[in-house]
Structures are given as C-alpha cells and as structure tokens.
Amino acid sequence: MKLLYGISGFYNSDEPKPPEVDVRKYEEMCYELAEKLGGEVLEFTDSLYPANFNKAYFRFPGKNVCLVMNKHYPVLAFAKTVEAMKIEFIDFPEGSAEIPGEYTVLTRDVLEADVPDNLTELLGHGLNKGEMEQIRYWKPETVGQVIFNFWN
C-alpha cells in the first residue's frame, strides 16, 4: 500500500495542507451499508482530535463492527474495536463487498504490515516531511497505525 501525501494528517507549515474527504458522503454510505446488510448504525463520529479518522459503529446480524475512514482520503477499514490509542482491525468480506468503488477498503493483512525499521524505505511513498518526523517520533509498528492514528 502506497502511503499518500498527508494520509497521517500531518504536514509542516511550509507544506501544502492534505486533502479532506466529505464526511457527509461517508455517513450516507454507512447508513446505506447498514440497510443493505440488515443492520443498523449505532453511532457515527466525525474525526475528533487527536484521531485522524471518522468512525461508525454497526450492529449486524450476529456481530458488531466498526468502520473507520481516514480523514484525508477515502480509505476504509473494518475493526472489531476502536479504543483509546488502539484499533483491532478485522476483515469483513460481506461489508467490503457492499462498499462503493470510490472507497478503498484495506484488508487486515495490509493494515498489519510492518512499518520498515529503516524509514528511508518510506521515501518512495508520498509522505511529506512533517509525516516522516511524526513517524520517527511516534514509532508506529504497522501501516494501519500510520493511516488511522491518535497522534497529537
């Protein structure tokens, strides 16, 4: 997975501000997903500092799940739990199959891929200088921790 410019939410003052997604479209998509799968949206939360993502909690027949969306790109992930500073990512194929094509749903394998020890390996991605500084500081272990973070 290529880490796009600003995906972590950070940038230096001399760098362009990262894009932001339309949270209303995401919220509408969540309600449509719940309807398609015979579930309900229990809670919807716009990104709240320090998180760089929006989240929706669902009750589906037989399971509760959360769907998180990066604040800067239409990148999604399903999770079993989203707690202070920790997200437990899961694969939810039946939910992923119903997500519209303008969104990218990341699998657990992609999200749990290691951040390289040698951060120069990330230079081929689109990350900006501010993000690289934050990655050095916070030392995320996985790609998922870069894309969906609670850094401040």
Image: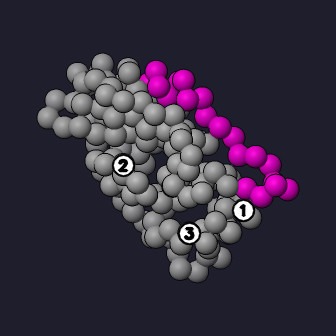
Secondary structure under tag 2 reads: strand
The vertical placement of 84 against 142, above or below, is above
Q: Residues within 10 Å of mark 1 (few under 14, many from 20)?
A: some
The vertical placement of 132 against 64, above or below, is below
Give, as a three-letter code, the residue at label 1. Gly
| In contact (CB < 8 Å): disc 1 and disc 3 | no
* Side (left or right) of 30 relative to 40: right
Q: CA distance from mark 2 to mark 3?
A: 19 Å
Q: Position of residue 9 (x, y in %)?
A: 63, 51
Circle 2 is placed at which residue position?
A: 82
Count the marks.
3
Which residue sits at x=54%, y=23%?
A: 24
Which residue sits at x=16%, y=29%?
A: 61
Circle 3 is placed at which residue position?
A: 138
Could you say which disc has been placed on residue 13 in the image? none
Seen from the viewer's position, the closer of residues 48 and 69 is 48
Q: CA distance from mark 1 to mark 2?
A: 25 Å
Which residue sits at x=24%, y=24%?
A: 39
Whichever of callouts 1 and 3 sits on the residue coming sooner in the sequence is: 1
Circle 1 is placed at which residue position?
A: 130
